[in-house]
Image (cartoon, helix red, strand yellow):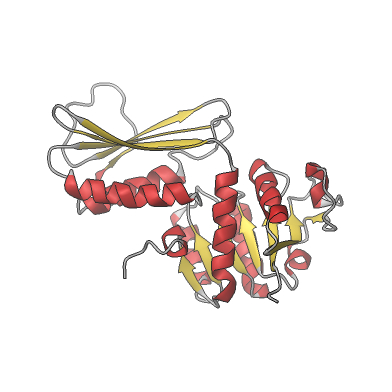
Amino acid sequence: MVSPLKVVIAGCSGRMGHALLETVFADTDLVLHGALDRPGNPNLGRDAGEQLGKASGVVVTSDIDSALKDADVLVDFTRPEASMQYLEACQKAGVGVVIGTTGFAAEQKTAIEAAAKNIPIVFAPNMSVGVTLLINLVEQAAKVLKDGYDIEVVEMHHRHKVDAPSGTALRLGEAAAHGIGQDLKDCAIYAREGVTGEREAGKIGFATLRGGDVVGDHTVMFAGTGERVEITHKASSRATFAVGALRAAKFLSDKSSGLFDMQDVLGLKKA
């Protein structure tokens, strides 16, 4: 009999933390091994399942090293600064990491790539199975519609999101750019204001909306003459991200090192 995968959840008191806890509790192939939150959080010292009316036997702690002892994988949807601390501790403990945090600076992404030489990591701006498929569809659409169509990426999230555009929007932009044979950094337009002049062909525009409790909406538009193709994904629950993240955790169970994304997890990456 295969033992359940021992999972540590970072930021367990947050919105995504709750969704991850619920998913772990519902999956017999997983067991909650550790629950982390920042120093000063009011839930420290309490049973992690108490927030959901369950008894898990795991106490919420800010002691990263103790939470990682004998663990299999850490799942992290926090902030870039905290993620870097978790990454360093996971390297020391030899524990795999699933990183769903967004808003990393270039040097932080480089640090994640370097860490993947020592431990297995799934790093993706969106763990949704649907969004992962969307990325593939956008790239294929861009290849077909690269001539005579203008590409715009529109995203909306809840009022509490701190980075913009979203990591998912940027990943969709990268897919579209790859489809038209460009690098996103050379063709992205992140803001428009005032007299901007006519739209330049070959550019990819971004529009960011924030408000309410929107979990995450993303649309990639291909606007041509006389028609518009729109590819959209709307998340109505954080459960979709939690299910994908824990699917990624299982994917890492037989890996010793390497940097992967959700394309790898779902077997969508071309050889």
Q: Residue at x 52, y 75 (%)?
A: 257
Q: Residue at x 43, y 45 (%)?
A: 168
Among the 4 quarters of the image, the one containing residue 14: top right
Q: Residue at x 23, y 31 (%)?
A: 228
- Is 167 positioned to the left or the right of 201 in the image? right
Vertical arrangement, residue 116 with respect to residue 185, above or below: below
Among the 4 quarters of the image, the one containing residue 153: top left
Q: Position of residue 142 (x, y in %)?
A: 23, 46
The answer to whether any part of residue 4 appears in the image is: yes
Q: Position of residue 20 (x, y in %)?
A: 66, 50
Q: Position of residue 141 (x, y in %)?
A: 24, 46
Q: Quadrant of the N terminus?
A: bottom right
Q: Residue at x 41, y 60 (%)?
A: 263
- Is 70 positioned to the left or the right of 90 in the image? right
The answer to whether any part of residue 11 appears in the image is: no
Q: Quadrant of the C terminus?
A: bottom left
Vertical arrangement, residue 165 with respect to residue 192, above or below: below
Q: Position of residue 98 (x, y in %)?
A: 57, 60
Among the 4 quarters of the image, the one containing residue 41: top right
Name the residue at the front extreme.
1
Front in this rendered view, residue 36 or 190 = 36
